[in-house]
Each structure stands twice: as structure tokens, then as C-alpha cells.
Image (cartoon, rainbow, N blue to C red):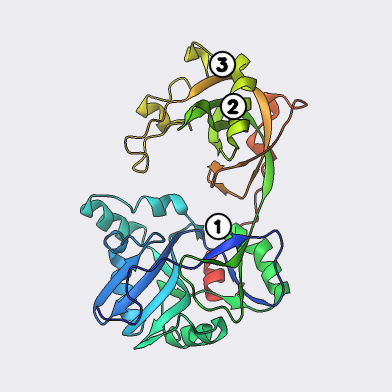
Amino acid sequence: MDLPVMPPVKPMLAKSVAKIPPGMQYEAKWDGFRAIVHRDGEEIVIGSRTGKPLTRYFPELVDALRGNLPQRCVMDGEIVIAYGGRLDFDRLTERIHPAHSRVRMLAETTPASFVAFDLLALGDRSLLDTPLTERRGLLTEALADAGEPVHLAPATTDTAVAAEWFERYEGAGLDGVIAKPLDLPYRPDVRLMYKIKHERTADVVVAGYRHHKSGPVVGSLLLGLHDAGGVLQHVGVCAAFSMKRREELAAELEPLRMDDAAEHPWARWSDESAHQSARLPGAPSRWSGKKDLSWVALRPERVVEVAYDHMEGDRFRHTAQFRRWRPDRTPDTCTYAQLEEPVRYDLSEVLSGSG
């Protein structure tokens, strides 16, 4: 491979802002695996956000990229999997598997797509110093004849349209809006773009915590919600605390600590078969490896308000943010019914730009 921008390349990043800034190019924020694709003739390299190769995990994309990208180019985009008319991150994570046979099977049953939104090189020309507006024009031309599963990400310079996308596209599993200054060069691994993400709040039960890596203080709080049958399901964690606050939380929660967790709703967490019928902390995962997943059981009596962006099935997609204790709420009132459910929106309309 001999391109003007060679792998590995880390993608340009975005910093969070509360509102959509004016006077920029706007795109949907895709909830998938960020990927930099290098193509030089028949050679294809798909690099992850950290620069590690993803190529072997998406064999169906390798063929599709050869058929849809210019002969020599470097593109920035997102690998996504659509299922039931929306993005499905869980099915995407299943693709990172050591068994080649498993990857091939999933490539056939749940094929991935590549959504391109920037162009770093074309032919013998590096575009890293080229303004965004010119890069976007070249990207649009380069993908003019592309077909599924390769897509050009919809973009607009109309703030009102971006605001509408922010509200409507969440129902298709998208994560918010990205704003890019029009004269922006491409700077790998630098936060020069802006992301505006959804945030909601929920009252949840604190049913345990994990120790911090530094010692016997709170590392993360384990959060639960009651399902329609009254069963407390593990929905995620909140973990962003100062060291002083971690120490304070350990002291605050000590009276709730259970020496014998046999009566805890999540007592069977270490039994792998129990995870098939309930959502419990410590679920076996290829991501966890040999990581210690043990936790401190608490009587599920305290309620906390947390902020979250959106749900992935019946759990928080990302780490929730601690907002405040809710002594006015009882644990039994913390149910899934309080969560906002965005209106469903067909992902195909987003990809086609007709939404």
C-alpha cells in the first residue's frame, strides 16, 4: 500500500457542547464503530479509532469497499449494523470475535454498512490541510455511484434542519448531531468538531458498587430499574467521581452494605446461566476477559437521579452521570415506565437523506 496518508490514522474527534452551534456543517452522530478506510487498488485496510485493524471482523465490507470506493483513497466513517429499521450496537459488538467461522456467519446474517463522512486522501493527494467544504464536495463526487452497503452520510448547513435531525433521528438509533466548522482541516486525534448528544434523566435504584482500582472506595455505582413484573434489573453504572467523592460515597453507603447477599435481587450474578433470564451485573463478555467483576451488594433502598443519553434495549447505552440523591422517591417507583421512548424512525430514510 502506497497512499499519501498511510495507516494507522486516528480519526479527528469532537468535544461535547450543550447546543447546536451556528454557521457549520451538520451531520447525524452515528452510533457504531468509527473507522478509517484505506484503499489502494485491491488492498483494503479498515482501522479503528485507536488505529488497530478491524479488517478481519468485517469481510463483507472489504468486498463492498472495493466495489464502491475510488481506487486510491482514505475515508473516515462509521461501521454500523441495522436491524429492525434502526442501529443495533449490540449486534455490532458481536462481530469482534476471535473465531473466523463466527465472524463469517455473522457477516452473512447481520451484515454491516459503512457510512462515509470525510475524505482524507484521494489519488496521490492528501486532503488533511484542505477545508471541510472542499473535502465534502470531493467526497460527494467520489461516492456518487456508490450503493449499499456503502453510504454517504447526509449533511446540511441549515441549523433548523440539524435541529430537526437531532429530534427525529434518535428513533433510528442515532446518537445526536455533529457540527463541523466549514473551513476545518482534518487533524487526526484532535477534538476540533462539536457533538450535541441527547440527555435525559431517570430515577434509579442503587443496588451495589464496585471498588475503584486504587482501593476500597467507590469505583462505580450499580444501577437498577424494576421491570413490569417488579423484578429489579441491572441497567448500567455511573462512575465519574472525584477521589474525595468516592471516599464519601463509600462512607454514605456503608449502612446499606449486606454481609450476606443471598437475599439480594442479583444474588445469582456469578451463575452464568442466570444471565439468560435476567439482567445482572457481571455478565460474561469478550470485553471483560479476566477483569474482576465482583461487586459490593447493598440493600436496594436508595434512589439516585442520573442523566443518560439513550437506551440500548433495556440498559443505558453509555455510563450514566450522577445528578443527585432522591430521598423523596422509593425504590419500587423506579421502573422502566418513566423512561422516554423516542418515536421509531426508519434508518433507511436517514441513509437515503430523505428524512
Is residue 221 something that shows in the picture? yes
Badge 2 crowding class, 10 Å Cα cut-off, few under 14, some 14 to 19, many 20 or more, is some
Report which residue position mark 2 lands on. Answer: 247
Q: Residue furthest top?
A: 260
Q: Quadrant of the C terminus?
A: bottom right
The foreground one among 264 and 289 is: 289
Against 242, residue 332 (above or below) is above
Q: Give the amino acid at mark 1.
A: Gly
Which residue matches tag 1? 173
What is the crowding at mark 3: few (fewer than 14 residues within 10 Å), some, or many (at least 20)?
A: some
Q: Residue at x 32, y 35 (%)?
A: 290
Residue 234, image x and y in percent? 53, 32
The residue depicted at 29 percent of the width and 50 percent of the height is 97
* Location of residue 300 in the rendering, given as x and y in whole percent from the top left corner: 61, 21
The first of marks 1 and 2 along the sequence is 1
- Residue 115 placement (x, y as % from top left): 46, 70
Left or right: residue 72 compared with residue 346:
left
Q: Give the mark toward the camera: 3 or 1.
A: 3
Query: Hey, what amino acid is under mark 2?
Result: Glu
Distance, label 1 to label 2, CA atoms, is 37 Å
The residue where tag 3 is placed is 257
| Image quarter hosting the N terminus | bottom left
The answer to whether residue 226 is left or right of residue 63 is right
Tell me the residue at 55%/81% (across/down): 132
Judged from the image, the secondary structure of the residue bearing numbered disc 1 is loop
Tag 2 secondary structure = helix
What is the x, y in percent for residue 167? 68, 61
Looking at the image, tell me whether mark 3 or mark 2 is earlier in sequence order. Answer: 2
Q: What residue type is disc 3 on?
A: Arg
Which residue is depicted at the point 26% across and 61% down? Answer: 56
Number of labels in the image equals 3
In the displayed structure, 143 sits above or below 55; it is below
